[in-house]
Amino acid sequence: MEVGFLGLGIMGKAMAMNLLKNGFKVTVWNRTLAKCEELVEFGATIGDTPAAVVKKCKITVAILSDPSAALSVVFDKDGVLEQIGSGKGYIDMSTVDDDTSSKIHKAVTTKGGSFLEAPVSGSKKPAEDGQLVILAAGDEALYEEAIPAFDVLGKKSFFLGHVGNGAKMKLVVNMIMGSMMNAFSEGLVLAERSGLNPHALLDVLDLGGIANPMFRLKGPTMIQNNYSPAFPLKHQQKDMRLALALGDENAVSMPVAAAANEVVYSYLNAFKKARSMELGDLDFSAVHEIVKIHKSSS
């Protein structure tokens, strides 16, 4: 199977590399074409535009930074719509809101193509290891056709029904994750300021009912003030905002999620404040720095 791949950021590069290493022919495109060069060394070919990639490949996958980028790749000049049509599938693995996904779905299917949204749960390391969780919705025939690729990219894929359900599921997951990271950051700071060994806290947490891979992975690097990006904080803040909008749309009160993203009792909006301090390109665990700064100034 020859697969087109649009977007070679932290996630996309690792995912495209896995496809290449597992025998897929891959044609790649990225706004910064230099990012394609490393993949060429592993057998990838480069498409000059998204349209060129779609023209060449039966299935094209995209994983882009936000709704604006996802729409641009489809609707702009030399975009996906110029070559999508009957017999061609488009799989958008970006984390976007369901409205954005629905717009792309309508445009692609109007041209005769098939569409699947398939955002992924997981960050850099799971992407490199082929251990993502794929949350797909849309054209079930395209889902079945993409299973060989999904089996390389992830440890589990779900088909969730109609377009929008995949986007919503991903936003719910990331909303929970963002809220947990805020609480975890506060716990680390509280332990340290109380004279406790934060490494001992990590050991205690890992043996209890709230043990989880995120605390296990992020805790040691947070203690070391190491925020090398696996999932950039600016993307986490975007996802929190989209999740809160989904809550408003469905009349669901989410005070915990709102506390992670908006002005709350003890400190001003952890994620947005971090972005204003130019931490947005660091890992989303950099919210820990905001908590530390706030506790110092209180």
Image (cartoon, rainbow, N blue to C red):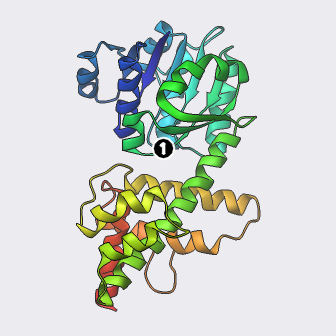
Against 122, is 155 above or below? above
- Which residue appears farthest toward the front when viewing the image? 207
Q: Quadrant of residue 278?
A: bottom left
In this image, 286 relative to 106: left or right?
A: left
Q: Quadrant of residue 245?
A: bottom right
> Could you say where residue 144 lies in the image, as x and y percent from the top left?
66, 20
Camera-nearest residue between 143 and 72? 143
| Residue at x-position 59% and y-position 22% | 147
Against 265, is 169 above or below? above
Residue 7 appears in the figure: no
Camera-nearest residue between 137 and 53? 137
| Residue at x-position 34% and y-position 56% | 283
> Could you say where residue 49 lies in the image, as x and y percent from the top left?
39, 18
Camera-nearest residue between 118 and 246? 118
In this image, 122 relative to 200: left or right?
A: right
**Residue named by callout 1:** 66
In this image, 75 relative to 40: left or right?
A: right
> Could you say where residue 183 lies in the image, as x and y percent from the top left?
48, 74
| Residue at x-position 23% and y-position 26% | 34
Q: Quadrant of residue 21?
A: top left
Counting other residues with Cα less than 10 Å from the Cα at mark 1, is it few (<14), some (14-19), or many (20 or more)? some
> Could you say where residue 124 lies in the image, as x and y percent from the top left?
37, 43
Residue 290 appears in the figure: yes
